[in-house]
Image (tube, rainbow, N blue to C red):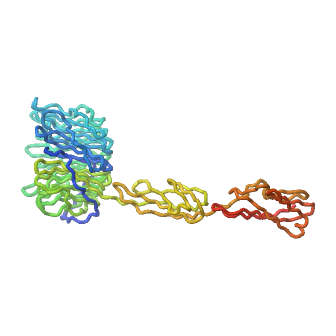
Amino acid sequence: MKVFLSAALLLSSMTLGAAGPAGADGVWRDPVDISPAARDGSSPQITSSADGKRLTSVWISNDGVQDRATGAVSSDHGETWSQGVPLNSITGNSTGVKLAGSQDGRRAVATFVDFEEGVNKKIVRSATLTDGVWAAPVDVSALASSAGSPSPTVAMTPDGQKVVGLFAQFQGPLHQIQARTSTNSGATYAPPVPVAANVTAPSDLGVVSSSDGQRLAAVWEEEIAGVDTVRASFSNNAGGTWSSPDTLSSPTRISSNPDLLMNADGSRVVAVWQEFVSSGQTLIQTRTLAGGIWAPSVRLSPVGQSSNNPRISGAADGSRTTVVWANETVLGVQSAHAVGDTWAGPGAVSEPGPAVFTPDVASSTDGLRVSAVWNKSNTQILSSESDDGGATWVSTVSTSAAAAGTGSPRIAAAASGFRFAAVWVRPDGTNSRIQAGTYFEARSQDITFSQPGDLTVGASATLTATATSGLPVTLTTTTPAVCAVAGNQLTALAAGTCSIVASQPGDVDFLAAADVTRTVATVRGQQRLACAKTPPARLKKRGKTVVLPKNCRTDAGQRVTVKVDGTRKSLRNVKVIKKAGGTTVRTFGTKVRLKLTYRASETGAVEALRQVRRVRN
């Protein structure tokens, strides 16, 4: 069961599409064994964090004495896994393990059935994972002679706080479908709430939750008047009460294998299942719940062919949906996809060939990037990817090596859809091992580097550069004699052309970005006189006027000189006195006009000073 989608119209005329290039160009890495040797593993499940880094898997492991629910985690994108940890400690067998996880991958909850041999009864239990450590299981159902048939199921909100568990409680001779909710990651549960009463032979339970845990939906298969029927119920108050069950499938057709998808706000739910019409014809059907009303069913698979085991995935906002299933007639995996309320398909996910079984599908948060896995003839796990929401698919690739008995694949997606993780069962010649494989497609990234303005020598500026990946951008200079870069600060050292390079080397998810170079003109600044009353506003009519104080310097620290010029008449009537680095002009009462030219030498940071002032007395 997954969280997401929408549905409505199926194209009245469907043609089988061909598998073709979808643009996805990632690779599946070599699988790793996550269950120990000499122990049979079965029924694997997997969840992924939004970034694909943290993975959690659970399965049933046989230690030679009993079947036990077992869990393992990876914190490095599936490169390595922790040793499997038993989730139960009873002296009996576990079955029907299911798994749900949080968005950050730090929390997960598993539900399973324990058979207590001492009392010959079954009980549904739940175990919570927090930062790689599994807590002791807690009881979810009451002990009953058939409490764990069928397998329980579970959903968790993205924050990992709210959990809903769905199970069938045996009440002899019938069952009651019950739900229990938790607000502390499954550490404790509220009392059970009935979802459906007087249920005969329930199976294939599924449950989904909105992001806030307020809206829930459940689906299951039960026998009504001798016909296997798909039914559903929903809750709009965090599981406090549930709607009267609705029958989704045809009351006259044997229906089974339901799957559910809910969008993030819980406003839309999509259910899919298979309906047996006649020998050689089993159809995949879908219905959408919106506003508390289930829309009429829509056929997704081809008429006159036998299709089964549908699985559904889609965008978090409900804008896109993808459904995959196994087609026994054409011996291949097929899909249908919806954009909004309009369905298209079916199309081929795999090339026609050997029989296919138990497909599964997962998608990115936007619903565009999709990956499907399936079992080929019980010998090998195959996969295909799409980057257009399931409209087209890349050629099939082998995810596992071939071995008789390989099967039961399950897949989970990172939010971006550039990482997928799958688990499956594969015999090693002695025992059935649980294997995990990861798909990775490195994403490209671009750098945006704002053009800095020109700088005067000695001045600084803040540089702005970002990468579309969100990864930090490194700034360096290829002209260290002209400018210096420290972090995002640029300082002009000398006049010339400064070159700054913005780079991002990539990481485990992103390819290196193309470098972006910016050039900045660095120019020498202008120096100014820094002496008081220099130059003077005017000369004294009679007496001494200081036109250059002793040791006068510019604001750049350069020594200043002055040259006194004028007409011959003016120069005859003044006396220029230079003493101790200063210059004084003495006038004698005669009107004079002088030109004072101040100079200071250039430096690497400033231009030479030349300032002219005309004065009179």
Residue 406, given in percent of the width and then of the height, sits at 13, 53
Residue 213 visible in this rendered orientation of the protein:
no
Residue placed furthest toward the right: 589
In what quadrant of the picture does the C terminus appear?
Answer: bottom right
Residue 57, given in percent of the width and then of the height, sits at 23, 45
Residue placed furthest toward the bottom: 568
Residue placed furthest toward the front: 580
- Residue 41 drawn above or below residue 509: above
Residue 158, given in percent of the width and then of the height, sits at 31, 44
Residue 248, given in percent of the width and then of the height, sits at 18, 48
Q: Which sits in the foreground, 123 or 217?
A: 123
Is 613 on the left or on the right of 414, as rendered? right
Residue 84 visible in this rendered orientation of the protein:
yes
- Residue 27 drawn above or below residue 43: below
Q: Which sits in the foreground, 45 or 290?
A: 45
- Residue 548 drawn above or below residue 182: below
Is 114 on the left or on the right of 388, as rendered? left
Residue at image point 91% right, 65% down: 573
- Residue 70 drawn above or below residue 358: above
Residue at image point 25% right, 35% down: 135
Residue at image point 27% right, 41% down: 108
Q: Which sits in the foreground, 17 or 443?
A: 443
